[in-house]
Amino acid sequence: MGKRGATSHLLGLPIVVLALVSPALGQEVTVQNDSFVTGGPAVVVGNFVSGEHAGVRLTSPCDGAIVEVQIGWLSESGETGESFERAIHIYEGSTFPTPGTELLELAGPVLTDGALNRFRYLDEQGTIPISIPISMGEQFYVTLEFETPTDVANGSPSVFRDVDGCHSQSNVLYAIPGGWMNFCVYLVGDLVIRAVVECEEMEGACCLPDGDCVVVTPSGCAAQSGVYQGDFVSCSSVECPQPLQACCFEATGGCLDLTAEDCLTAGGIPAGFGTDCATYVCFPIGACCLPDASCQDGLSPEECVALDGVFQGDGTDCATTDCPEPTGACCFSTGGCLVLTAENCAVAGGTWAGFGTDCSDNNGNGTADACESGCPNPGGSGSYCTADIDGSADCLVNLADLAQLLGHYGMSSGATHNDGDIDPPGGDGDVDLGDLATLLGQYGDDCN
């Protein structure tokens, strides 16, 4: 083999690309073990005999496809022109140092001295691209099989390496004799043999405008107006800038633009993402329209909501506020029901059941409860008075209703609602303890 000591050391090596290169169709990542950079030191490695291989084991950074192989080729002068070698091989790489199944053979590569030669096609015409599916974390070998014996001491070109040490299980040699072996036994640097993997769109941390962090693709980050932090970057390793927001101080009524964390530290109330003191009102006070169309002045939004009202805005007052008319059930002679204002109910020819009523049919008899039994507003201030069964349409649950139920107590297989079968809504055919409990639960209710 004669490979030890037969090397030359060059500084300032210019690296040029001489092979055809197709435009990138996706996000491409160059995979390499070496640390060589243009203009840096390089060491030519030799001497090889015909049929021997020099290669590297690489790891895919993503799911995608191997689309290019790069072979660094150099002589002491850098001016020997072109060399015709036997083949470039790509192998499955789960074992070391012996490669697994061959994935690709690119026969007869032409290597130019003083160049990082790049190969993207299987044919000389450049019509059949290299494309080998690869998974994230999958290892593979790229090797150059020599056709012409190398004699670097006498100016022959060969593969070259960097000068930063040989990484474990990253360089291989197929020697004749000897077979596959760890090339780091002989090398003190990594061979400049690389691959390019075209990745499916990768993911990384994305800082969103509200200061949150999510792991998405670059396009997904842009769609959310975020700032992409880089491929494979995790949110745990990123501190996303926190936006300022209005911070309200109850004791003073003042406002400062602070981050949510700083606002809480200062004892303030964060107003939420997207707010600022220039436009946000910290403690609004104004008119509140109540469900019965009345109006109350000087309430906060929270106080208004607690009364089931609608806040009219900071600085408003009842003198200049026109609260909407209240609505209630509008009962029609056809048996139908709509929730309308009293005015609109009259226009439609219906009978208005009163403010706060609706068209629910809790007893399941097909008629809106508010439109039954002559009671103008059953359940108006609470749940529907299912226990108002005495037939007087007084909208009260009292002794008369209790007497009506007790008079039918124990009746089964046919009891009606008016007999006292009020539990569950719609009845179960019996008048029993369940019905008595329902009536007692509503006892004293005023359904108006």
Image (cartoon, grey):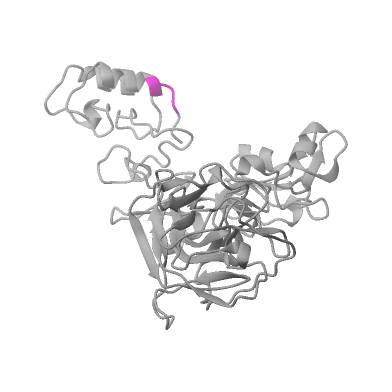
What is the quadrant of residue 16 in the picture?
A: bottom right
402, above or below 247, in the image = above
Residue 398 shows up from this direction:
no
Q: Is residue 20 left or right of residue 364?
A: right
Q: Residue at x 35, y 50 (%)?
A: 100
Q: Position of residue 340 (x, y in %)?
A: 46, 55
143, above or below 212, in the image = below
Residue 65 among magenta residues: no
- Residue lying at the far bottom in this picture: please name it: 125
Q: Residue at x 17, y 16 (%)?
A: 410
In the foreground, 376 or 69: 69
Q: Residue at x 83, y 33 (%)?
A: 266
Secondary structure mostly taken by the magenta-highlighted segment of the chain: loop
Q: Is residue 310 left or right of residue 1?
A: right
Count the marks: how many?
0
What is the quadrant of residue 254 in the picture?
A: top right
Q: Position of residue 356 (x, y in %)?
A: 49, 44
Residue 213 shows up from this direction:
yes
In the foreground, 320 or 279: 279
175, above or below 37, in the image = above
Q: Residue at x 29, y 53 (%)?
A: 335
In the foreground, 209 or 139: 139
77, above or below 33, in the image = below
Q: Position of residue 36 (x, y in %)?
A: 66, 58
Q: Position of residue 134 (x, y in %)?
A: 41, 56
Magenta span of residues: 441-445
Q: Is residue 221 left or right of residue 315?
A: left
- Residue lying at the far left in this picture: please name it: 413
